[in-house]
Image (cartoon, rainbow, N blue to C red):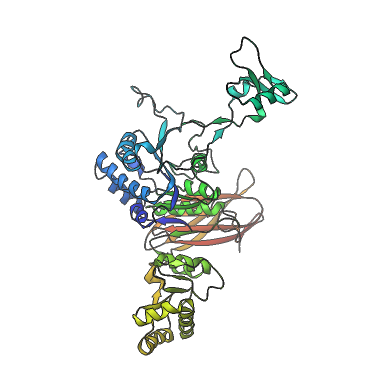
Amino acid sequence: MNKLILGDNLEILKQIDSESVDLIYLDPPFFSNRNYEVIWGDAGEIRSFQDRWSGGMNHYIGWLKERVEEMHRILKSTGSIFLHCDWHANAYIRVEILDKIFGEENLKSEIIWKRTFNSGSSKSLAKKFPINTDTIYWYSKTEKYFFNRITRPLNDGALKRYDKVDEKGKFMWVPLKTVSQEKLKKLQESGDIREEPHLKYPRYKKYLNEDTGVLLDNLWEDIGQIHTRDFGERIGYPTQKPEALLERIILCASNEDDVILDPFVGGGTTVVVADKLKRNWIGIDQSVQAIKVSEMRLQKQQDLLSKPFVVQLHKYDYDTLRSSNAFEFESWIIQQFGGISNTKQRNDLGIDGKTKEGIPIQVKRSDNIGRNVIDNFKSACERFDSKLFEKNQIEKKPIGILIAFTFGKGAIEEVARLKNQQNLLIELKKVEDVVPIAKKPKLTVSFNDLGLNSKELRDIEFIATGESEAGIEFYAWDFNFDQQKGFKADILIDKIGKQIYAFKIGSYQIAIKVVDNEGLESLEVLHLKINGIVHQK
């Protein structure tokens, strides 16, 4: 299942199965020794920043190297890694990390991305050339890697070379250096070849409509960085990479349904593009804000055909878990427990998954489980694998594991009776024993009618106030909320909780989310009717 995971990527990478990922893109924090690299400013990112800069270059390389070692392990033999870096440490990263872990023979390309055409301040560039490029190292794990050649459209200069026209369209004469006799004969018969004594090679007609474009080389200067005018894509993340850049990397080094990993997910561009291109994906970040912003970007583009995804936080909200999709919750909580979920939604004989040792697991997304559930589960365990049932009974091991929010007195007494009288051990696990549960933040919203503006639209000021023991991280706003489509953020990152929005006459639903420092959230919806006067429903 597609996942956004909050936490230290080193620890999370260690939990991922070997040779299970097809493509890794990572854009780790650059070795620039500047505090502006603390972008989100939350506790997780600051902690990571301090770890990274507690020493000099050697410490930074060591910090990154142990993570890349885990990435090499989890890559499939046909997989690739693209590591994005800048001039501060690119030489060290190549020699001390990538060459040593992947082997210098597996360097496929040193891609130079010209991200900007700005020259910088005259003072800073008085005695040096401006630096407008980043480096992206592409390494394969073995010689049997996947690669899909990519072309880009012809530029104006190339188009001008097609300066001849016939009934088939625009063409140019091109030297014919190697060709089979059969193709040569066809060209001669069609009149699309010109042979003259003074020409070393015959010429043939190459038509514009047959030109698939120019093969992409390692100088990428046709994709610019995100600008303030890119409203549809820009989220306010200072080092946000353009979707076109990640689209190119993903298309050239993976297929549909492959697994894409970004261990420094940042603003979420990698997972957003992977999702659009029908890849599976995993995104990891130490920052709550990075994970939640990535989640909202994914939610905004999802439709009925999109694959579901989960967000793994340090703590989870009880209300959200209790009201989640039953099958998705079963699968998720079993994975959190360390088990293997059942992919069938029907005819599963009452078993939702199993442990790695094969012990059956049942999940109940409810509270106060009663005795009848225990009786039914005991029978389901026996039907599931009678030999394992008998073996576990003899060896005094659990015949099954039942996960629920809480268990009633009848269930607890029945489990005790089965153990004492029949030597049958059923293990009861509360959800809070599997994942930590916390209270979601409180949210109140008020508004002020500011009257008509110069465009005859009504300006409304909204004020959101969140309360949480963990502290408030940020707010997000959806000014055209549709219950069926879900929350689609118009404003992704609002640190203050105030917005002014202009409305025409009509009825509106405005949804506001608050996110706390644990990543838990609350949602409030305002129903406004504007007909010259503002009414709240």
- Residue name at image x 50 percent, y 50 percent: 258
- Residue name at image x 44 percent, y 68 percent: 334
Residue projecting furthest to the bottom: 421
- Where's residue 405, x and y in %? 43, 74
Above-or-below relation of 503 to 172: below
Residue projecting furthest to the top: 198
- Residue name at image x 41 percent, y 77 percent: 388
Q: Nearer the viewer, residue 389 or 126?
A: 389
- Where's residue 54, x and y in %? 25, 45
- Residue name at image x 37 percent, y 48 percent: 71
Q: Quarter holding the C terminus? A: bottom right
- Where's residue 345, x and y in %? 55, 69
- Where's residue 75, x and y in %? 41, 49
Q: Nearer the viewer, residue 409 or 372?
A: 372
> In the shown orientation, is residue 532 left or right of residue 16?
right
Residue projecting furthest to the front: 181
Above-or-below relation of 267 to 386: above
**Residue 127 visible within the image:** yes
Above-or-below relation of 390 to 536: below
Q: Nearer the viewer, residue 378 or 243?
A: 378
Q: How many marks?
A: 0
Above-or-below relation of 462 to 151: below
> In the shown orientation, is residue 380 left or right of residue 530?
left
**Residue 427 visible within the image:** no
> In the shown orientation, is residue 473 left or right of residue 307?
left
